[in-house]
Image (cartoon, helix red, strand yellow):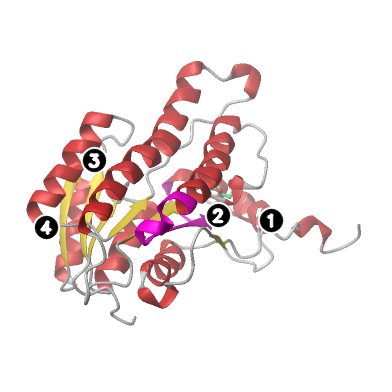
Amino acid sequence: MEASLHGQKALVTGASSGIGEGIARALAAAGAAVVVNYASNPDSATRVVAGIKKAGGEARAIRADVAKEAEVEAMFAEMLAAWGRIDILVSNAGLQRDAALTEMTLEQWNTVLGVNLTGTFLCTRAAARAMIRQGVVAGVSKAAGKILCISSVHEVIPWAGHANYAASKGGMKLFMQTVAQELAPHRIRVNAIAPGAIQTPINRAAWETPEALKSLLTLIPYGRIGVPDDIGHAAVWLVSDTADYVHGQSLFVDGGMTLYPEFAHGG
Ligand code: BGC
């Protein structure tokens, strides 16, 4: 991959597994130094950091629950003390607590909104403050900073049994567009990637048996499940200067899941 992020400092939330891990590895391969944020699994974060270093990159792990203001502030303070700046925030940390609406507890609702949406707010606010302070630095990037939200096809596709998750991603869409409008004068680029079904622990039930995978594939015109690298490559492009005029957009990386696949025949 083209090394286009040399000299830049990135923070990826929820980077100890899944899509976040894929993005952290891809940004590092493109030359960025990467903070691997994790909430509860230090061993996995250490494994990701070691993998990045082995491949010749720079990384460090920092623990923080993104739903907690004090922990987010401490994480950014630690990063800025160590590296002096932040060029790229990838707000990726996300989880599901699935239940039918009539069974959903307030705890399930609050947990999902807390990590997926409040976490994105807290990290975006902290990153924006630092990016505004540092401004555009010639030779680093054309932008003062880049913020990338990892949303979902469920920012537009309703999803029965997942009202908390769909609400968090629908909220993320207008949060992203609104802060894109607000931060543009500061030369901070804000975008989202909306992944479809990517093979990670969060959706294991949807791919771990042949029957489940077969049923999942009926929703994916391109005929395969995604892998974290699919998102990593898109993320590298979106936060690089190659995409300097791309602002306030959700890039769907979903094998066509948003193409109403049930209408491929009939209708
Ligand atoms: C969810 C996955 C799901 C995918 C496609 C993602 O946002 O986290 O569980 O497989 O959307 O429906």
Disc 3 residue type? Asn
Residue farthest to the bottom, as pictured: 2
Distance from mark 1 CB to nearest ligand 1 atom below 8 Å:
yes
Residue farthest to the left, as pictured: 82
Mark 4 element type: helix
Alpha carbon of mark 1 to alpha carbon of mark 2: how far? 9 Å
- The residue that label 4 is drawn on is 83
| Sequence order check, earlier mark of 1 and 2 | 2
Disc nearest the viewer among 3 and 4: 4
Alpha carbon of mark 3 to alpha carbon of mark 4: how far? 23 Å
| Sequence order check, earlier mark of 4 and 2 | 4
- The residue that label 3 is drawn on is 41
Percent position of residue 149, x then y: 43, 52
Q: In this view of the protein, can residue 19 be seen by the observer?
A: yes
Q: In which quarter of the image is residue 236?
A: bottom left
Alpha carbon of mark 2 to alpha carbon of mark 3: how far? 23 Å
What residue span does the magenta drawing correspond to?
A: 181-201
- The residue that label 2 is drawn on is 197
Disc 1 residue type? Leu
Residue farthest to the right, as pictured: 267
Residue 208 lies, with reference to residue 122, above or below; the image says below
x 42%, y 47%: residue = 201
Whether residue 115 appears in magenta in the rendering, the answer is: no
Q: Quadrant of residue 86?
A: bottom left
Alpha carbon of mark 4 to alpha carbon of mark 1: how far? 43 Å
| Sequence order check, earlier mark of 3 and 1 | 3
